[in-house]
Image (cartoon, rainbow, N blue to C red):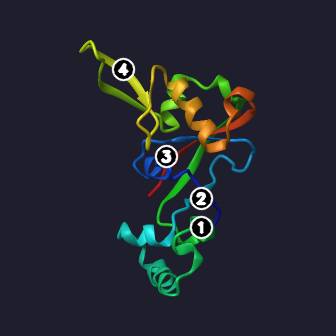
C-alpha cells in the first residue's frame, strides 16, 4: 500500500487524523480519485497512540524492539503498517494562488475567533498550527505555510498544483 506524508512541524499529520485537514496540494499528480493510502507516521508514534490493528501489532513491535530506522523517521515506514488511511475523493488542477479561503481551511489553516486586539476588540485571525503567527486572511496564513513546507518563494512563483480532497476512512 502507498503512503502519504504530511508535515509534522506544523502538525499537519495530526490535523488529518483529527479531520481538520481534508485537502492537500502537490506539484505532481501522484494519486487518483478513489485511491486509499496510509498516513505515514513513525513506528514509535503509532505505538504511543496505542492504536494498532492486531494484524500489524506484532510486526511493528518487532521493528521497534529492533530499533528499525522507521522507529523515529516516517520515511522508512511501510504503508501496510499504518493504522490511519485516507481515501482521495476529488482532484483539481489549479494555480497555487487560486486557492479559496474555504480551501485554505481544508488545508489545515485554523480560524481563531478568540483574538483580542490591544484596543480590547475581538477580531478573527488565522493561524498555522505549530506557530504563534496570526494572519488577517486564510490565504496569508496558507502562503506562509506553503513557503515553510515547500521552500521560500513557492507562493510567489505560483506553480500549477494538484489539489486533492480526501477523507479519513479509519
Asked whether disc 4 touches disc 3, contact meaning CB atoms under 8 Å apart, the reply is no
Q: CA distance from mark 4 to mark 2?
A: 35 Å
Q: Relative to 117, does residue 83 appear above or below in the rendering?
A: below
Mark 4 or mark 2, whichever is nearer to me: 4
The reply, left or right, for residue 79 in relation to residue 52 is right
Q: Position of residue 106 (x, y in %)?
A: 50, 35
For label 3, count other residues whose C-alpha is less than 10 Å away and answer few (under 14), some (14-19) or many (20+).
Answer: some
Q: Is residue 114 left or right of residue 83?
A: left
Q: CA distance from mark 1 to mark 3?
A: 22 Å
Could you tell which of marks 4 and 2 lies nearer the N-terminus? 2
Q: Residues within 10 Å of mark 1 (few under 14, many from 20)?
A: some
Of 34 and 106, nearer the camera is 106
Residue at which label 1 appears: 79
Q: Which residue is mark 2?
A: 37
Q: Which residue is mark 4?
A: 124
User: Label 2 to label 1, Cα distance in Å?
Assistant: 7 Å
Badge 4 or badge 3: first in the primary sequence: 3
| Residue in the picture at 39% in, 49% down | 18
Q: Which residue is mark 3?
A: 10
Q: Is there CB contact under 8 Å for labels 2 and 1? A: yes
Residue at left offset 46%, top offset 85%: 58
Tag 3 and tag 2, C-beta contact below 8 Å:
no
Q: CA distance from mark 4 to mark 1?
A: 39 Å
10 Å neighbourhood of mark 4: few (<14), some, or many (≥20)? some
Q: Disc 1 vs disc 3: which is toward the camera?
A: 3
SS at badge 4: strand
Distance, label 4 to label 3, CA atoms, is 20 Å
Query: What element does badge 3 sit on?
Result: loop
Foreground disc of the pair 4, 1? 4
Task: Tell me the element at label 1.
Answer: helix
Amino acid at each position: 500500500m502507498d503512503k502519504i506524508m504530511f508535515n509534522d512541524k506544523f502538525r499537519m499529520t495530526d490535523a488529518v487524523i483529527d479531520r481538520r485537514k481534508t485537502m492537500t496540494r502537490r506539484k505532481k499528480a501522484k494519486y487518483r480519485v478513489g485511491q486509499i493510502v496510509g498516513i505515514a507516521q513513525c513506528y514509535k508514534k503509532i505505538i504511543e497512540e496505542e492504536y494498532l490493528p492486531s494484524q500489524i501489532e506484532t510486526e511493528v513491535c518487532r521493528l521497534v524492539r529492533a530499533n528499525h530506522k522507521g522507529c523515529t523517521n516516517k520515511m522508512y515506514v511501510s504503508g501496510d503498517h499504518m493504522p490511519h488511511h485516507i481515501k482521495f475523493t476529488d482532484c483539481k488542477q489549479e494555480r497555487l494562488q487560486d486557492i479559496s479561503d474555504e480551501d485554505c481551511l481544508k488545508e489545515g489553516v485554523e480560524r481563531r475567533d478568540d483574538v483580542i486586539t490591544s484596543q480590547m476588540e475581538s477580531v478573527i485571525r488565522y493561524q498555522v498550527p505549530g506557530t504563534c503567527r496570526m494572519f488577517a486572511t486564510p490565504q496569508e496564513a496558507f502562503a506562509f505555510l506553503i513557503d515553510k513546507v515547500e521552500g521560500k518563494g513557492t507562493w510567489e512563483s505560483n506553480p500549477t498544483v494538484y489539489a486533492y480532497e480526501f477523507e479519513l476512512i479509519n
